[in-house]
Image (spheres, rainbow, N blue to C red):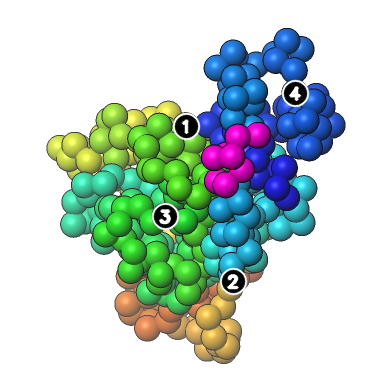
Amino acid sequence: MFALLSLHRLTVGHPGLAQKLVQIYGSSELVLSEFDRRLTPIAPAIASAFTQSAFSKEHQNLVEADRAWGEEISRHVISVDHPYYPLRLKSLSEPPFLLFVWGDLDRIASDQIAIVGSRKPTPLGVSNATRMASQLAEVGFTITSGMAIGIDAAAHRGAMEASGGTIAVQGCGADRIYPRSHERLALRILERGCLVSEYPTGFPAYARHFPQRNRIVTGLSRGTLVVEATEKSGSLISARLAMEQGREVFAIPGSIRSRQSEGCHQLIKQGAKLVTSVLDVIEEFHDFEVRRSSPVSPSENEQSVLSLLQDGPRHADRMVEETQLSIAELLAILIGLEIKGEIESGSDGYMLRKLS
């Protein structure tokens, strides 16, 4: 593990480099012991890091700090060969060489939806992020985001309000919390999921780290939902990364006069799916099994839904209020009724098939 940590620390700012060097030399140990800058096709500045830093006392102490961090309770350092390393992340062209995970290690292999957006959202944006995260968590998705101020934080909180799981991917060292104002939020996240970083201990939260962090947020997830974003928002970078990774991209529309919705409208024009309900997200994943939050009587509740639709089309959000069912229970019923051919969905919501 010491050699893995050492190589990772030397290359962490250059995604894919550590794995390339291991492929050339055969192992992390051999990279460190046999490295020859004359024979290795990497930038001179990076080569100097190996020759000058790899065996320095300072570097050795830093690597030892990384190893000590990973030996603490509920803290894990996993490589691409580790059985818990997420398959979705491993499929990326430049997956993180190591992941530092603090919390529930099982959580990183769960079905995840990333929710991202503005650091300066509108009240409506915060409400939408919280509600969507809560409903997606209630049906079984883990909510993944970057724990930033604004939409990220609202998404994490929404997931936890539904007693669901959530993952925060950080752009700083594994031993740090960023922003510092979210220390309490981080502790709550640890109760329902985990904190993840590819940065070794001691690394500050530099701006250049966040695009690299974002590829992990989207790479872990089956899809990325953008709630609010300006035309030049960093959330659009996340959306583009998700598209490049072959993931689904979703966007919530807003007012044409709202600057915070410009980015979402741009994404929708480029092919992102317009989302007005959690159902718009779920229906893209045909293999996803909606989790029922509690035992229900299918026949009785199906009849309640069918009775409502006798009066005309309805959206799921309205039916939740009218039936007093949870979103998880309602979604299970709606999906079942659609499969049976009793109802169908359209722009006006769900309707009886005979009325469409």
Please name which of the two marks, 4 or 2, marks the residue nearer to the observer: 4
Residue at the image position 32 percent from the left and 77 percent from the top? 321
- Cα distance, mark 4 to mark 2? 35 Å
Find disc 4 in the rendering and name its residue.
Answer: 35
Neighbor class of circle 1 (other Cα within 10 Å; few <14, some 14-19, many 20+) is some
Find disc 1 in the rendering and name its residue.
Answer: 240
Under mark 4, the amino acid is: Phe
**N-terminal label among 2 and 1:** 2
- Cα distance, mark 3 to mark 4? 32 Å
Instruction: Please identify the quarter of the rendering in which residue 94 is found.
Output: top right
Specify the principal SS of the magenta part. helix
Q: Of the numbered discs in the image, which one, if any, rests on residue 73?
A: 2
**N-terminal label among 4 and 2:** 4
Find disc 3 in the rendering and name its residue.
Answer: 176
- Residues at circles 4 and 2 in contact by the CB criterion of under 8 Å: no
Residue at the image position 84 percent from the left and 31 percent from the top? 26
- Residues at circles 3 and 1 in contact by the CB criterion of under 8 Å: no
Residue 309 shown left or right of residue 70 in the figure: left
Please name which of the two marks, 2 or 1, marks the residue nearer to the observer: 2
Q: Which residues are magenta?
A: 55-62
Residue 289 shown left or right of residue 268 in the figure: right
